[in-house]
Amino acid sequence: MTKFPVLESKLILAPMHNITNVAFRIMCKKYGASLVSTELLSANAVSREDNLNLKLALTDKKEKPIAAQLFGQNTENLVKAARKFEADFDIIDINFGCPSKKILSQGAGAALLKRKNKIKEIVKEVSNNIKIPLTVKIRNEDAIEVAKICEKAGASAVTVHARSVKQGYSGKADWNVIKKVKENVKIPVIGNGDVVDGKSAERMLKETNCDYIMIGRAAIGNPFIFKQINEYLKTGKEIRQTKKEKIEDYFGYIKLTKEYKIFSINDAKLKAQDFTKGLSGSRELRGKLNMVKSYEKIEKLVKGL
């Protein structure tokens, strides 16, 4: 087992489909995320050199440390994918907690929580074949047992999304599960679920004694949340972005997507909605965005807020 690195802050960006591309990760890093991750990547696709998945794994040195998150149930392909990414990434993370029906139907993600021997096999084989840390993400189902299995098999840290598979991303997270996992393993535990601001982050740290906090949906369109929470944890002060600053962040994101050649009109529309959520006029903006087909018009609409 390779030791999990000591991170600069308590905050980690969660992998999110269609969200955590290189541009968004760089922004979160700038605002204080201590570790960022690719979105969930198919180990099967990566092992057969699928161009789409390899493009999603585009990374830059300024993101470091960065994790590549993989899913799959084929041990050989998970090893191949992990070894392929080893040179460019600092951590390989395997998702044993994704509740997506598409991934569950493949016997991957949270479906593996019912196959503990398979989890043990995967973690052992992948960790034995790479020189960088291997981490895992799990859910509430048998969380203590699964975490202990992963630790013994060679995992360097475990992330606990404190919801059940049935809950998906809804309902209240049960932080007590995170606390119990922390009490039963020696490797770092990363808590995930219902942290949306400084106060909830502070509560999670105190109530669970977890080592780090993973932030997902609260960061969508809001990379500033990492600066906001870090400031609160250090000083107890609550800081806010202005409307102007939020809009500037949107255009900063667009600039990065163009720089890394991942810009698309659809993404520009979606992120315009995400970055302006809650601002005056944002509801009307959403309706107008559905009608436009050029970035110039998107730019004009966002600037006109």
Image: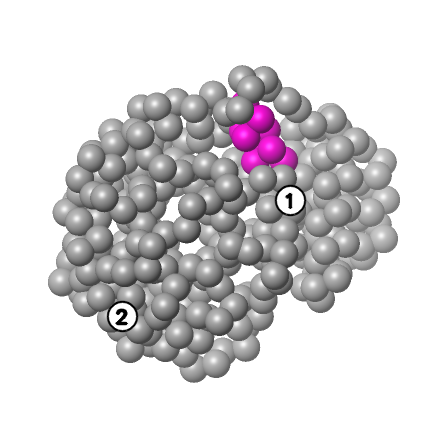
At horizontal 20% and vertical 60% (from top left) the residue drawn is: 153
Tag 1 secondary structure: helix
- For the magenta stretch, what is the residue range? 224-232
Magenta stretch: dominant secondary structure:
helix
At horizontal 85% and vertical 36% (from top left) the residue drawn is: 304
Quarter of the rendering containing residue 227: top right
x and y percent of residue 113 in the render?
21, 54
Instruction: Relative to 61, say whether 7 is above or below.
Output: above
Q: In the rendered image, which residue does mark 2 sit on?
A: 128
Residue type at numbered disc 2:
Asn
At horizontal 53% and vertical 24% (from top left) the residue drawn is: 234
Q: Is residue 228 magenta?
A: yes
Q: Is residue 20 shown to the viewer in this render?
A: yes
How many marks on residues? 2
Q: Residues within 10 Å of mark 1 (few under 14, many from 20)?
A: some
Residue type at numbered disc 1:
Lys
Instruction: Relative to 146, say whether 202 is above or below.
Output: above
x and y percent of residue 218 in the render?
52, 35
